[in-house]
Amino acid sequence: MATINGAVENGQPDGKPPALPRPIRNLEVKFTKIFINNDWHESKSGKKFATYNPSTLEKICEVEEGDKPDVDKAVEAAQAAFQRDSPWRQLDALRRGQLLHQLADLLERDRAILATLETMDTGKPFLHAFFVDLEGCIKTFRYFAGWADKIQGRTIPTDNNVVCFTRHEPIGVCGAITPWNFPLLMLAWKLAPALCCGNTVVLKPAEQTPLTALYLGSLIKEVGFPPGVVNIVPGFGPTVGAAISSHPQINKIAFTGSTEVGKLVKEAASRSNLKRVTLELGGKNPCIVCADADLDLAVECAHQGVFFNQGQCCTAASRVFVEEQVYGEFVRRSVEYAKKRPVGDPFDAKTEQGPQIDQKQFDKILELIESGKKEGAKLECGGSAMEDRGLFIKPTVFSDVTDNMRIAKEEIFGPVQPILKFKNLEEVIKRANSTDYGLTAAVFTKNLDKALKLASALESGTVWINCYNAFYTQAPFGGFKMSGNGRELGEYALAEYTEVKTVTIKLNDKNP
Amino acid sequence: MITGFEYPELRIASTLLAQAGAKPAMSSPAQPEIPAPLSNLKIQYTKIFINNEWHDSVSGKKFPVFNPATEEIICHVEEGDKADVDKAVKAARQAFQIGSPWRTMDASERGRLLNKLADLLERDHLLVATMESMNAGKVFRNAYMMDLSLSIKTLKYCAGWADKIHGQTIPSDGDIFTYTRREPIGVCGQIIPWNVPLVMLTWKIGPALACGNTVIVKPAEQTPLTALHLASLVKEAGFPPGVVNIVPGYGPTAGAAISSHMDIDKVAFTGSTEVGKLIKEAAGKSNLKRVTLELGGKSPCIVFADADLDDAVEFAHRGVFTHQGQICIAASRLFVEESIYDEFVKRSVERAKKYVLGNPLNAGINHGPQIDKEQHEKILDLIESGKKEGAKLECGGGRWGDKGFFVQPTVFSNVTDEMRIAKEEIFGPVQQIMKFKSIDDVIKRANNTSYGLAAGVFTKDLDKALTVSSALQAGVVWVNCYLAMAVQYPLGGFKMSGNGREMGEHGIYEYTELKTVAMKISQKNS
């Protein structure tokens, strides 16, 4: 299977796997305040909120709780940093790239610390945090570092005696609201292109997982970004998130999270100042397995596709369509896989699955599992919480799932694999597209024509063929329909963080 | 987007000149402190670099490398010839095989290696700058601040491209799915000049390696030392063996072997137009290898009466005197509008008189020697022709000192278009100042040459600036600046100044073959 971000492919040349990295024991959390102008601030209200370790349900620490006045302060700083003639605006583009490279160097230096923090705060397996999240972050910053001095405008052969050219200018102050499932990685996807294009940023990390974002604040300062270029305001959606989305001095907002909240963000953006909006939202992603596919590959990819990160991925393969001839065998092997999935302490190197993020998500997932049972899907394995342990849920597989069941329609965001049956291509195309979502899709087949046909027929921002979760910083990612607006990553991301200015100069017709 | 004044290279040039007593043409920041050159430089690398290893020449021959300021031998270097080129091509071909570590490497990893190479060059900044200054006769401060910094930036810029060399998917007619891939060309021969040896080397290997090619580099026989040092860094950075091979030697032997080699897929050359023609001919006669050429110039610099005169004098001056005039983009035909002609000449002469000549490694020296005897004699001969043909010698005009290949900074006024100094590339510290009356007239005269490398225009009038810059036949037009070098934009020649472009996005594409893949599908949909 194509590994996520190519991360675990970093074997040494002799083929021996590298020694496994270790988490940091008894890690002290150093950064818990609001980061504005390269300084640490207390919240104006004096309030703090607790962040928990979802594996143990213990409180990790308290973090300053931002609200509208703190967002205002951050926006002021970001605006000042974006003033014409400011150090940031006057910096050579190549130098902006170098700063991003240096940030990547520091992420590499502190990789084990950040992976440990991420695991503490999200409950994701430490090795995943280290090899997937951190690898993805580092590569994202390096990739966009390279773009900084390659954001080219054009000269255009317009009619008449004029010189016409375009400049791709930064948009200004960009708000970014990041989710709790890949806290640092989603932050990198927003911060790297925003800074690469020369914007300034006000960032709200998810209230469940603010710790790696705040640590990154310290690295921003260490690298030497000018004050005000990056500002981080931890807090809650209805307060900080709403203040960002509706702020009249924020020129753009990028949000990753649920479709429900995405709609609120875009609405607030429209109502306030028509700020530019990019959204990466939910998905109910079809994964289509044709009878001619390499079945081992398909079973493993579909399994990882839905169970990875405790099922808490917007790209989760949560509608697996299997062609009828191989359906029985596919279900059998998928159940075997699910039963073997090691669930437990995310700091244990063998663990593949940790806890869900919080009680609310946990309850929602169990409720959907119950609906599956009630609506007549066949529970093949799992189907309940782990005994005597907080937020852990057993890897669950449902067969005989039909399109009208809730588990086939709603985003579950948990370790639940619904497997559906199909008979022919035209049918599966229709069923796969019959959803408001359109984030990703996957196809397993050895047939070239089928592969290309499905690749063009499926209504989704990404189609993976014979692979899953194959993310690359070079390739754009985003949703059709209600899975989002705009794209992140790749060259396409640059368009989301720049305004195009057309300059037209009339020439004197008398000159030669 | 035009921010030529911001480039540190220019700030440096301006402070350098300020040091020589010139009135700074623009607000010049405090002169950056740089370390003294290494006093005990040891030359470690003098052999042929193939497959990440050091080889003696097959013939057993070596050649001497000189310090042009003292005419003393610095060291002897293994002399590559056809047999050594063959060895290098074998290594490069092997490294380019399908399935090789280099071909299967992630593009982002190629970028990482290039960034690493840049970091190592930064680490050895002082050593390499000392070496370049000693071997090329380059003023140490320029070598340290301009050549090294531009080389490092070049590698970093190209590193960023490695995983951004996009093909396209194309909505072709029919039930066909079409896409393009930009693939590396293969084994690339690269022949480097002696005037800016390290910069030109990075301009060639940076794009070639970013695209995934393998290379065989022949540095100029006068200046092989920094190329060989860089080879050691290539190995240290961890490039697979055979990806970069460096064969020092002479043009008629090693250079000819590269241009006419049947198993080299592309040759890139920077040097004279005369040799460029030989190279393209050899490429045609052998295997039709792809060719890019950066050749000579006789670049016009046009100063209108409404220009900021201080700026124009300063840039025009630097444009021709930088590195003792040994730059292909030298502003060697200066056209000045008649109403300000006398004043312009007066100030230019004052400016040219302010140099301190001597060993370029010594503090306080800001004008070094020419590269060798041949160049030295050619320049003196052209100066004589100027005197004979009736140009007015305003200052300089002869040799300086009796050791080392020094030429006095020379200014001619009353130059007319048919004089040899107005037509031939001088490649020395000699400024020709001509007079013009109208915009039509000066455009015609500026374009009346078989060269077309660079041009400069000085005016405050928006319309004139845009009109003249589109009318001039040159690969780069600088407006109200000159030599505003940056790695992000392409450079190259119109007409007989070259083929193709180096640097910028266009320079990257010169190192790719475009493949179209068209696939029959059962049914197309938009």
Image (spheres, coloured by chain):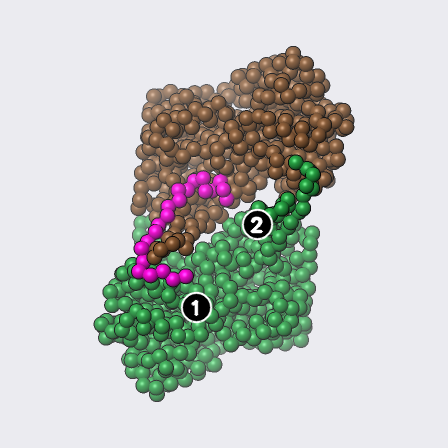
Chain colours: A green, B brown
Chain at tag 2: A
Q: Determine the CA span between mark 2 and mark 1.
A: 30 Å
| Residue occupying image coordinates x 70% and y 25% | B435
Q: Residues within 10 Å of mark 2 (few under 14, many from 20)?
A: some
* Magenta segment boundaries in residue numbering: B505-526
Q: Secondary structure at mark 1?
A: loop
> Tag 2: residue type?
Gly
Tell me where residue B431 appears, x and y as whole percent: 66, 23
Chain at tag 1: A
Label 2 vs 1, first from the N-terminus:
2
Quadrant where the N terminus of chain A lies? bottom left
In the image: residue A309, left or right of residue B393: left
Q: Secondary structure at mark 2?
A: loop
> Which residue was labeled with disc 2?
A153
> Tag 1: residue type?
Leu
Tell me where residue A407 appears, x and y as whole percent: 38, 80
| Residue occupying image coordinates x 29% and y 66% | A298
> Which residue was labeled with disc 1?
A439
Quarter occupied by residue A245:
bottom right
> Which mark, residue A64?
none
Q: Can the viewer see residue B202?
A: yes
Tell me where residue A148 appears, x and y as whole percent: 55, 51
Q: Nearer the viewer, residue B184 or A110?
A: B184
Q: Nearer the viewer, residue B400 or A322?
A: A322
